[in-house]
Amino acid sequence: MAFFEKLGAIFKIVFDNGGTKYNNLWLDTAYDWQTLITAVVAGVPAAIAAYLLWRQVADQRKENQRSREQQQIAARIKMPHALAQLSEYWKHCFRAIIAEDLTKKTTTLPNDALEVIMAAAPTVETDTFEIMRTLVTESQVFESRLRSAQSRPIGNMTQTLVVDVASLDILTDSLYDFARFETNRLAMTQPDHQMLSHQIYKVLDFDDKQCAVEIKRLLVESALKRHFRAIPPVDSK
């Protein structure tokens, strides 16, 4: 009791305002500080409620993140096959374009492959999304130009289509590492002269008569010059 008596004496010295209501230190102290005590008592449930709400929001964010990761994994599993379909289609188109004979184009754009890419796009970070968005939109532009060229003499459209299909092939190739889970982030880069030249000559079939080879080479170099405004072509050898 001695301890509490001393503690009560200290409280009396500190909080004594010269008058008492109940002639009891603890009751008088509670009376004098009732506003503060009420605020504290009322604030405790509010603080607990705020903490519980914060935990609920944090848990929901974690659940959303897990769901997003699962959706991305499910979408990426389907991508390698879709990219392979697109790669084969670009090569098929390129051979018809470089021959300047679009009747050799006997297949259509694999829209189911593009749908796989579009399904994966909302779950990825910004740069990878930009590559996917560009691939889908530029594919549609290319198909429109191709249909236009099929309905009339191909003429100067050949040069435009050569660069278009090479750019699409580069975009498609750039997504393989992401689709195979070898990286989680890609960088969007604008194809330069060297990249386009390499991509074209990689597909170009040189197992032909020499005169045809030279014609193809001249057509490719003309297309690159037109696209890059007379930048010297890269030697393919």
Image (spheres, rainbow, N blue to C red):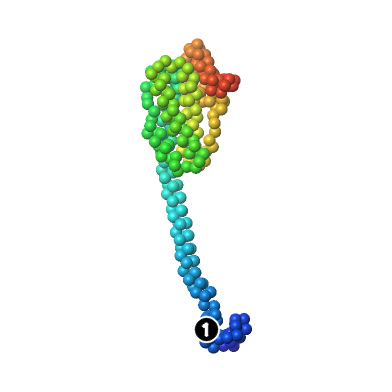
Horizontal arrangement in the rendering, residue 102 relative to residue 22 (left or right): left
Q: Quadrant of the N terminus?
A: bottom right
Quarter occupied by residue 93:
top left
**Does residue 83 sit above or below 149 in this rendering?**
below
Q: Amino acid at mark 1?
A: Leu
Q: Quadrant of the C terminus?
A: top right
**Does residue 81 sit above or below 6 in this rendering?**
above
Residue drawn at x 49%, y 69% is 43
Picture coordinates of residue 229, whole percent (x, y): 57, 21
Q: Residues within 10 Å of mark 1 (few under 14, many from 20)?
A: few
**Does residue 187 sit above or below 169 in this rendering?**
below
Please, which residue is most extreme toward the front here? Answer: 19
Residue drawn at x 42%, y 23% is 146
Asked if one can make out residue 233 in the rendered structure from this viewpoint, the answer is: no
Residue drawn at x 56%, y 23% is 228
Instruction: Name the residue carrying label 1.
Output: 27
Quarter occupied by residue 105:
top left
Please, which residue is most extreme toward the top here? Answer: 211
Picture coordinates of residue 147, whole percent (x, y): 39, 23
